[in-house]
Image (cartoon, grey):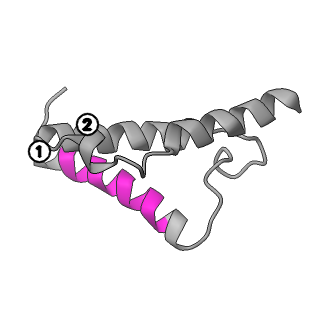
Amino acid sequence: MQYNQTYIFNELDKVNSLRNRIAHHETICFATNTSTIDTSYVINIYSKIKTLFSWMDIDSNSLLYGLDHINRVCAQINQLKAGI
């Protein structure tokens, strides 16, 4: 895989798409255009964000301290899915 300007732009665009969905109060815990519970989209974008932070030499653990609830909330959603 080649990490060039186009690749980085596309990764940032994916992050921005999630940001827009959140800002417009759209659901993010369902698979696209379905009613199936699926947190993989959010977890994938979250991973991209942390990767981008590491490329910029940003300590994501320090930056997100006290704010980082993504994994816990996604795990709770997945537990609800398992109980259905």
Amino acid at pointer 2: Thr
Amino acid at pointer 1: Met
Q: Residue at x 56, y 73 (%)?
A: 24
Q: Residue at x 13, y 39 (%)?
A: 55
Q: Which quarter of the figure has residue 4?
A: top left
Q: Residue furthest right?
A: 84
| Numbered label tally | 2
Q: Residue at x 19, y 40 (%)?
A: 59
Q: Residue furthest bottom?
A: 24
| Residue 48: x %, y % from top left | 33, 40
Name the residue carrying label 1.
56
Question: Is residue 60 on the magenta stretch?
Answer: no
Q: Give the Cα distance between marks 1 and 2.
A: 9 Å
Quadrant in which the N terminus is drawn: top left
Judge by depth and name the residue closer to the eye, 50 or 11. Answer: 50
Q: Residue at x 45, y 37 (%)?
A: 44
Task: Classify residue 4 as left or right of residue 7.
Answer: left
| Residue 84: x %, y % from top left | 89, 33
Task: Give me the disc on residue 51.
Answer: 2
Q: Which quarter of the figure has residue 2?
A: top left
Query: Alpha-carbon neighbours of circle 1 within 10 Å: few (<14), some, or many (≥20)?
Result: few
Question: Is residue 14 on the magenta stretch?
Answer: yes
Q: Magenta residues, as a range?
A: 8-20
Query: Vertically, is 27 above or below 4?
Result: below
Query: Vertically, is 17 above or below 70?
Result: below
| Residue 75: x %, y % from top left | 63, 33
